[in-house]
Amino acid sequence: GHGSLPYERSAPDKLLGGLLPGGFDEKSCRSRYESSIYRRNPGRQPSPHLIAKLRKHEELQRRCGPNTDAYTRAIQQLRAGKSVVGSPECKYLVSISYRGLGNRILAAASAFLYALLTDRVLLVDPSNDMDSLFCEPFPGTTWLLPRGDGFPLPGYADFSIDTPESYGNLLKNKVLRNDDDVDPSSSQQVPAFAYVHLDHDYGDDDKMFFCADDQRVLSRVPWLVMRTDLYTAPGLFLVESFREELDALFPERDAVFHHLGRYLFHPTNRVWGLVTRYYRAYLSRPGTRLGVQVRAFDAWQANSPHVLQQITSCLWKEKLLPEVLPAAATSSTEEHTTALRAETTVLMTSLRAWYSERIREMYWERGAASGEGVSVHQPSHDEHQQLGTESHEAKAWAEMYLLSLCDALVTSGWSTFGYVAQGLGGMNPWVMYRPLNITEVPDPPCGRDVSMEPCFHSPPVYDCKLKRGADTGKMLPHVRHCEDVSWGLKLV
Ligand code: GDP
């Protein structure tokens, strides 16, 4: 029965306003259609153009994806390494999965947006648990690059800034040209594949990716392999030839990741079990749910009184939690107001247990001055970041998702983990600014972010038309610098 379901709405919008396709087997991926039951905030509505584009793209993925004749032909061409003249039948984008889960999610979302804009089939590298954490987003096909020796670029996962086939190196070595005097429709021979290096360490030639002339060259390369650990969507808005389509797809520019994320990333049943069991056990009582994500980037942040002070002053200053009574006082109002008292449930996530233990203790030992009930919960504390440990990654994904189900969110600046939660949840978070040293408490401790979008941490700083350096945060009204990473770019 539905009696114990956490949040009851008469008819939860299972397909999120048409964002999600129907027709999946619901049992094979319960989160896809159940998430709306757990979310109080229904989120933003996708534009009709986005919905139409997604349905068209799903059709492309089915027509050209793995286990089709078109795919077999494309693989044969790639294996032969032939240069291509004219337009290929199907074009592909392979997205490498590496680094932390937040980074991998932002990378896959960025790759998908690029695939949408360029009519490429997206194939996600299945390593690092991408196949066991997420359900298939496209009906009737797979978004995973098939494992095994079928893929003719066996070393793709090690491609780096030095790979000769990177777009930057192809330009530098004049294998490809992007200058004005090359007619884009000309028969300039293009290779069967190119590697697009959009990693945080990328160079000026790689960054030419964000120019329209270069996109014209790349559009003729049938296979692209992309490595990024960044959220590059704000950079795609800088590409003049993409702008009109992006504006039509996303009339609300601050909801790009919100839509892409809810479309693509559905926890598998195993992870969904972690989400729903925790939710029912700890987060389903009435009252407000506050998510607090504490990312300890450095060892000294494991149990720093200064970081603790930053967290509590942010929560109190912004009135997200009631202040605790001074240590000596006792609350007299408590006993008589039980029935009327407001309750706040705090979900804290962190690699460390120390912060939530201190805050839980404060409210237990001293109580809130308002008499309000505050309960503090933290699902796990694995102490160290681990790569490739499946249970660790499943917990990390479940915790990101649980944060996204809260009513309000406080995040740690710089963290892609927090970006994913805020985007899925459709919330502008309060961002705690990153403390630079052990004894500093940033003042103010936190601030309300201007949008729910992730920050693009290493954007290009180049004007493609004037062909010189420029502040890309000042070129378009809706592409601005981030609150947390001052040189980064975000959509607002
Ligand atoms: P970022 O490094 O903060 O940008 O976020 P990432 O998700 O890319 O990488 C951090 C990794 O550390 C995560 O993928 C998790 O494996 C782990 N991690 C960091 N914070 C938490 C947390 O609050 N809970 C859990 N379970 N894992 C975390």
Image (cartoon, helix red, strand yellow):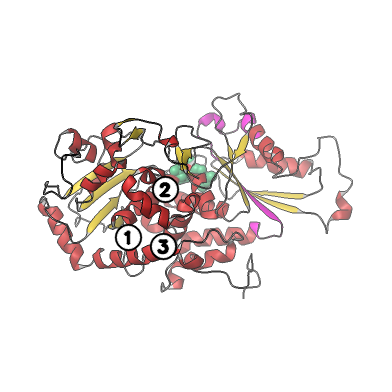
Q: In which quarter of the image is residue 170?
A: top left
The disc, 1 or 2, on the residue closer to the chain's N-terminal end is 2
Which one is nearer the viewer's eye here, 45 or 30? 45
Q: Which numbered circle lies on residue 172?
A: none
Q: Nearer the viewer, mark 1 or mark 3?
A: 3
Q: In which quarter of the image is residue 475?
A: top left
Q: Can residue 20 be seen in this view?
A: yes
Q: Give the range drawn in magenta.
A: 282-308
Q: How far apart are marks 1 and 3 (CA)?
A: 22 Å
What is the secondary structure assignment of the residue under circle 1? Answer: loop
Residue that badge 1 annotates: 143
The disc, 1 or 3, on the residue closer to the chain's N-terminal end is 3
Rate crowding at label 1 as few (under 14), some (14 to 19) or many (20 or more) other CA atoms within 10 Å: many
Residue that badge 2 annotates: 106
Amino acid beneath label 1:
Trp
Residue at 49% across, 32% down: 486
Which one is nearer the viewer's eye here, 461 or 380? 461
Residue that badge 3 annotates: 49
The disc, 3 or 2, on the residue closer to the chain's N-terminal end is 3
